[in-house]
Structure formats: C-alpha cells, structure tokens
Amino acid sequence: MGYIDLFEKVTEKFNFPDLYGQEHIFWFGRESLIFLSLDKPPQKQLLERDLSELKDSLDEIGKADTELFLCIWKENDEFRSVFKSRSSRVRAMDFLNYVLSDVGLVKGDSVSSYGRITTASLLVRLGELGLNDVSSYFMHMTLQYFEDCDLIIADEYSRINQNEILNMKQYRKKHVPWAFVRSADITKSGTRIDIRTLENESGIDFTAGDDTYVMIGIQGEVYYISAAKFEKTYNETDEPFDIFTRMTMFIPEIKILPDGKYISIDEMARICYPKNTSKIYAQRLDRRAKVFPVYDRENYFLGFAGDYMAVRCDDLSDIYIIKRQIFLQTYEEV
C-alpha cells in the first residue's frame, strides 16, 4: 500500500482564515488523520489549541472523527510541523520523532509535539527516498510509521501465542541493585503522577497509592508495578539510593498532576535486590513494536529492533519492553 492509498486529497475549499490562512491543502487519512500543508506559518492559536478544541472544524474537513492532526509549513530556512493526538495508539512525540528520524528536532509530549528540520536536510532525505516534494515525504513517513510497527495487545497476544511464549528462552535478573519508592511516599494516595521513562520520553501517568511502587533500574529506567509484584520479585533493604554512584544515563523525575510540580525521587528511594525465583521469557525484537499492557491501555511500551520483549513466567499476560543495553546488563539466561 502506498501513501496515496492512505491519504485522500480533499478538494473542497474550506475557509478557516483565523487558524490556517487562505491557502492550504487538506489530506484525509484512513487512520482518522488530517494532514494540512500550508504555504505560510499558521496563526498562533492553531499551535496552542488542543485537538478537542480543533475537533469541529477538522471533522468538517475529514468527514470523520479526527484523532490525529499533522500540520506542516515553511518558515525561514526550515520546515516546521505540529502534530496532535487524542489516540492511545499514537503518542505525538513518538510520531514526530519517527517522521523526522535523526535529522530533525522534536519537543512535546504524548498529546502535542513540535518539530523542525532544515530545508537542506529535508532535501537530502527526499533524494534518498526518491520523492519530489515535501508533502509526499510527510505522507510517506506517516505510512511507514504505521506499517513499520507490530502492535501487541498483551492479553490477546498471550492467549493466541501461548505456545510461542513458552518456547522462548528464560532469563532472570542478575544480583544487581535496583531502587524503589512507594508512590504513597511521593504524594498523597489518589494523586495522579507522571514519570518520564526510557521507553516513553513523553511520560506515563498513574495514580499514587499504597499498592503501587515506582522502580528505578540500573541505567535510570523508571516504571511502576503493583506492591504484590514487587514482593514476588524483589527483596527490599534499608540501604539508601545514591544517584551519583548508581546512575549514568537517566535521572528519574516525577511530575505531580495536575499542578505540574516536579519532584526528584532519588533521595527517598531505597535499594532492593531481585529474588532468584523471579523469571521471565524474553525474545529479541527484529522490528519496531508497541506493547499495550493489560493494566494500562492508555500507554504503551515502545521497542526497536534489538530491544527485547519480556513476559513474566508467573503471568503470561504481563508483557513489556526492555531496552537492549539494559537487558544485557541486568538479565542472564537461566
């Protein structure tokens, strides 16, 4: 399937000069995506509004329930882009990072992201891909974003592929120190928390409570687990966590929602060690993959070729991604 099959050009003239200006091209994609190519910078409010505020006008364009919105324009000697998502399947920052690959700059979060790429760099990419114009590049990369990825719904995958999982190699965590914090010690129970992780740069949020722990790995990888899984997997100690001797890549940071206050959790963390009885099945990925865990369908683990898909031996529906370097440092084959 080519990008022309994914996108349908909307030929009708829509007039939203307050947002887009008079000259524009709309494309409607089958992924409930509106792609807007402008001949000049858009009005500031387009960049500031979230997708729910733009929904009425976008649905009129696409004749569909818009979930994704991509807008590009040229400004000075750069092409700039904004991408907005209200789909749990696509994080905005993840999308633009893929589309602009290693040649652009991207910032944002899971809902809105902003990208910029120099005209010279984009022309090189057009030549490499055999494309003739900028709109074709963004449509081509959008198609690749969806096609170059396996979607793994944890409970469905474990049910359909149980024999395949059981034939994977088994691994256990090496006896290396991890750190943990009870989320109820970070903020009061019931408060929403957002954490940046190595698998999700735009952040993943959850609710603080006595039954939820925040884990910090050997390279600073951060994730949350239930108290029951923590007790099955780790032995806790009273040894304090020293970020300067333990961490090298990633400093864990917590954002308290909705006020946006940031808290460093390293001073309240303590060391724990994996139990020898805790094992996983694991398999190396040969292409990009998104894993949607059973306990949180609004977020996904993102893995790339060379990373590992892991499955807990005591719960085949508990599937997640482990970065390659972290896996090699912290796991050994049983």
Image (spheres, rainbow, N blue to C red):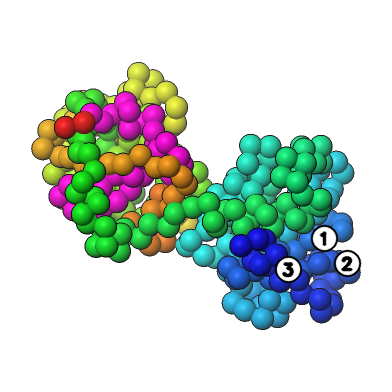
Q: Nearer the viewer, residue 137 or 300?
A: 137
Q: In this view, does 123 lie to the left or right of 104?
A: right
Disc with the residue nearer the chain's start (3 vs 1)? 3
Helix, strand or loop under label 1: strand
In the image, the segment drawn in magenta is 303-332
Classify residue 283 by image quadrant. top left
Q: Which dot marks residue 38?
A: 1
Q: Nearer the viewer, mark 3 or mark 1?
A: 3
Determine whether the residue tagged by mark 3 lies in a helix, strand or loop. Answer: strand
Q: Is residue 265 above or below residue 87?
A: above
Question: Which residue corresponds to the image point at 58% horizontal and 62% vertical from the top-left?
Answer: 85
Q: How far apart are marks 2 and 1 (CA)?
A: 7 Å
Upstream in sequence: badge 2 or badge 1: 2
Please state, as top left, top right, bottom left or bottom right, where the C terminus lies in the image: top left
- Residue corresponding to mark 2: 23
Which label was assigned to residue 66? none
User: Disc 2 vs disc 1: Cβ atoms closer than 8 Å?
Assistant: yes
Q: What element carries label 2?
A: loop
Residue at the image position 15 percent from the left and 39 percent from the top: 278
Q: Magenta segment: does it hold 96? A: no
Kind of residue at badge 3? Trp
Q: Residue 27 carries which label?
A: 3
Q: Which of 47 and 85 is in front in this view?
A: 85
Query: Residue 184 appears at what percent x and percent y?
Result: 27, 49
Instruction: Please indicate whether residue 35 sits to the left or right of residue 204 in the image.
Output: right
